[in-house]
Image: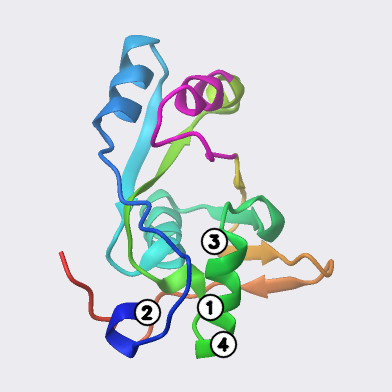
Amino acid sequence: MSSRLGIENSIASDCSILKPITQVLFENNIAVKAMRDVTRGGLGTVLNEFAEASKCRIEIEEDSIPVNQEVKGFSDILGLDPLYMANEGKMIIAVGNEDADRALHFIKETAAGKNASIIAQITDGNGVVMKTHLGGSRVVDMLFGEGLPRIC
């Protein structure tokens, strides 16, 4: 996007191959309940699709979502929300509580998963809600309208 807009910055692409992450989970018998890349509609949309399909509520912690500080700043300047930006080479994986810490350990051992984190808990209810870094709550809806165009 910065190239398209002619804005210089030091943000480097973090696109990566996801196979090593999925492979390490299956090799270590992690019971994956759902997984998906966050390309179409971004993280916010994918989480909403998970919540709707599973008839549950997903509660995310804003501070646990690994977004580079430069990307946050760039997004703020342009009025964009990183939750709805396509992110090639990143994925969301749902596992049971009993596998969460082990799964994170194995994911972090891969090059593509080095910045992985546990960002959410599944609860009773519906929809997606984010606890903000200020201590408030924000409803995270599906992406409305067109996503940003991308080159792939």
Q: Secondary structure at mark 4?
A: helix
Q: Are marks 4 and 1 in contact (CB under 8 Å)?
A: yes
Residue at 48% over, 20% down: 106
Distance from the alpha carbon under mark 1 to that under mark 2 = 9 Å
Q: Which residue corresponds to mark 4?
A: 77
The kind of residue tagged 4 is: Ile
The amino acid beneath tag 2 is Ser
Label of residue 2 in the image: 2
Residue 109 point in image, percent of width and height? 47, 22
Q: Residues within 10 Å of mark 4 (few under 14, many from 20)?
A: few
Q: Is residue 133 magenta?
A: no
Question: For residue 126, which numbered disc appears in the image?
Answer: 3
Q: Is residue 56 positioned above or below 34 on the image? A: below
3D distance between C-alphas at marks 2 and 3: 36 Å
Sequence-wise, the earlier of marks 1 and 3 is 1
**Magenta residues, start to end:** 102-117
> Which of the numbered marks, if any, corresponds to residue 74?
1
Callout in the foreground (2, 3): 2
Instruction: Say which element carries label 3.
Output: loop
Nearest the eye: 49 or 103: 103
